[in-house]
Image (cartoon, rainbow, N blue to C red):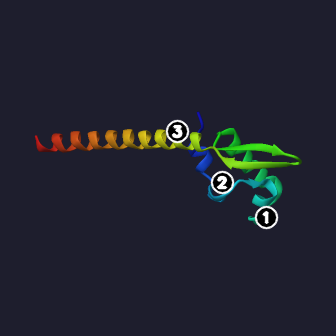
Amino acid sequence: MSDVYRALGDPTRRQILNMLKSANLTQKEIVEAFDISQPAIKKHLNVLLEEEIVTATIQGKYRIYSLNQESLQIAYKEMLQSIGDLLDDQLESLKNYVEKGEE
């Protein structure tokens, strides 16, 4: 399963994902939207591919990048569960602290 935190942890990758939300794009189109080098964008795209947040298909000499909607939905649900578990633990700790203080 993808590590959504790794994929979303960088603002450039989040911006790439935001771009892909509207349309499938070539690497060249993505590179043109940034003030960083093509190799740097390629590294960001590779992270997104490794984490299965985006997919790439080859059409002729171009690689077309698109969002992997299914993977994003699964990652979103897992992230919500993780946050819910964290909050449950924190609330349990707070409850125990308050109950001990009342004694």
Using residue 96 as the reference point, say whether residue 81 is left or right of it: right
Left or right: where 35 falls relative to 96: right
**Label 3 Cα neighbours within 10 Å, binned few <14 / some 14-19 / many ≥20:** some
Q: Residues within 10 Å of mark 1 (few under 14, many from 20)?
A: few
Q: Residues within 10 Å of mark 2 (few under 14, many from 20)?
A: some
Instruction: Name the quadrant of the N terminus.
Output: top right
Q: In the current view of this chain or complex, which residue is farthest to the left?
A: 103
Give whichever of discs 1 and 2 has the lower sequence position.
2
Kindly indicate the quadrant of the structure image that contains residue 22: bottom right
- Residue farthest along the right direction in this orientation: 61
Q: Position of residue 19 (x, y in %)?
A: 66, 59
Q: Can you identify the residue that label 3 sits on?
A: 74
Q: Which residue is mark 2?
A: 13
Q: Position of residue 26 (x, y in %)?
A: 78, 54
Disc 3 residue type (three-letter): Ile
Give whichever of 98, 86 is nearer the camera. 86
Left or right of 31 in this view: 11: left
* Residue closest to the eye, 94 or 60: 60
The residue that mark 1 highlights is 32
Q: Amino acid at mark 2?
A: Arg
| Circle 1: element type | helix
